[in-house]
Image: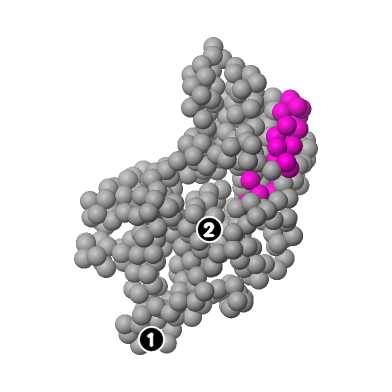
Amino acid sequence: MSWLIPYPKLDSEQRETIDRILANKGRNFFIKGFAGSGKSIVLLHILIKAKQQNPALRVCVVGYTNSLVDMYNASIPPDIKNVSTSKSINNCGVDAKTYSAFEKSPQTYDMILVDEVQDLSEKVVSLLHSQCHQLIVAGDGAQSIYEHGMPVAAMVSLINAVTIELKILHRLPNKIIEIVKAIFPSNELEKASRSKLRNVDVTLATALDVNEEIKYVFETASSYANSRVSTAILLPQKRFILGFIDAVLNLHNFDEWQVKKKKFGEDFDNLNNYLSKCGLSIQYLGGGYGDLNDTSKVHLLTYHSAKGLDFETVLVPNVCENINIWGRKDIANNLFYVALTRSRINLYLSYTGKPHPYITRIPDNLLRRVELPIKKQVEVATEEELFF
């Protein structure tokens, strides 16, 4: 599945950005923009047009996560991928890799394009800068979710970049923008211009029994995936995802997954194979595991892995009072902002017991509330009742 929007459908601001960058070969640029402003789409079209103008151009796209790199690989048109020249790195002159893969094996390119640059360290940014004739980076300081990320102003100075800002939102539904504004008043997302954005409901489901929440989240997500609607369930950390999966398996009378380990952690290929064997259309996505393009399955991602991606339907469960999204408050805020802004159409929030303070800040008029069936009488979900 390609995320590439045809060039004629881009707005004038996006087209002017692409043309300006391509007209200034050798000049470095920073594309600044809010979530949903089309930064990744602009990077893709810069790559495509640059290769069309010069098939021998050596180009590399660098992303922070494997999932983001997979998105680019799925979106680069076959005719661009299949260009073969004597200068090609991989028979086509286009590489897409994570920053860590680039760091392990640096290569020189004519052009390097970097998405989510705000998450890269100064060391990595310096390396990328030294390995190309033109460096084009895109990012949003409000989505900085790693402690080692380089401040945007310092990054722009380091690579001597011209800043171009994308000011029009194209993806986020209006109510999600209003919810972000309510939760994070200092966030400037609502100041952006809006194209013809969808007016769809944001659903908040509440339960007193955590199993009712899990059942609702899984069944809702599955109903969308069964219709081939790209769907993701987002949780803050891997341990929460494993707890969610065990609960889903239990609800369907399957044994819990027996954790298999690889050199750098859990073997999620083994997990995904087990879920398929059980007939559950759900997969772990992240760290090189799972298939982003398989819309028949519900994708389970951490907030970190979802960065830079978007889906037609997003479910963010377990937003309860005791959830620890991240240790540092500023990083936790940015992570939840990322989770809220991954949806192109539908957004579902849910919790068991009492809500997280984020939820209490949302005005009732922005939410469609659903009270889930109650199986047992509890006042508040305890730590043991959370699904992690």
Left/right placement of residue 20 relative to residue 197 reads: right
Residue, x 70% and y 62% (percent of image)?
190
Asked which secondary structure carries label 1, the reply is loop
In this view, the residue in front, 97 or 51, is 51
Comparing marks 2 and 1, which lies closer to the viewer?
2
Residue, x 43% and y 53% (percent of image)?
229
Q: Which residues are magenta?
A: 12-38
The residue type indicated by label 2 comes to Ile
x and y percentages locating residue 353 in the rendered image: 44, 80
Q: Quadrant of the N terminus?
A: top left
Residue, x 51% and y 36% (percent of image)?
75
The residue type indicated by label 1 comes to Val
Query: Few, some or many C-alpha atoms within 10 Å of disc 1 (few <14, some 14-19, many ≥20)?
Result: few
Residue that mark 1 sits on: 378
x and y percentages locating residue 128 in the rendered image: 64, 32
x and y percentages locating residue 13 in the rendered image: 73, 42
Badge 2 or badge 1: first in the primary sequence: 2
Residue that mark 2 sits on: 345
Looking at the rendered structure, the number of numbered marks drawn on it comes to 2
| Colour pattern | one colour
Asked which secondary structure carries label 2, the reply is strand
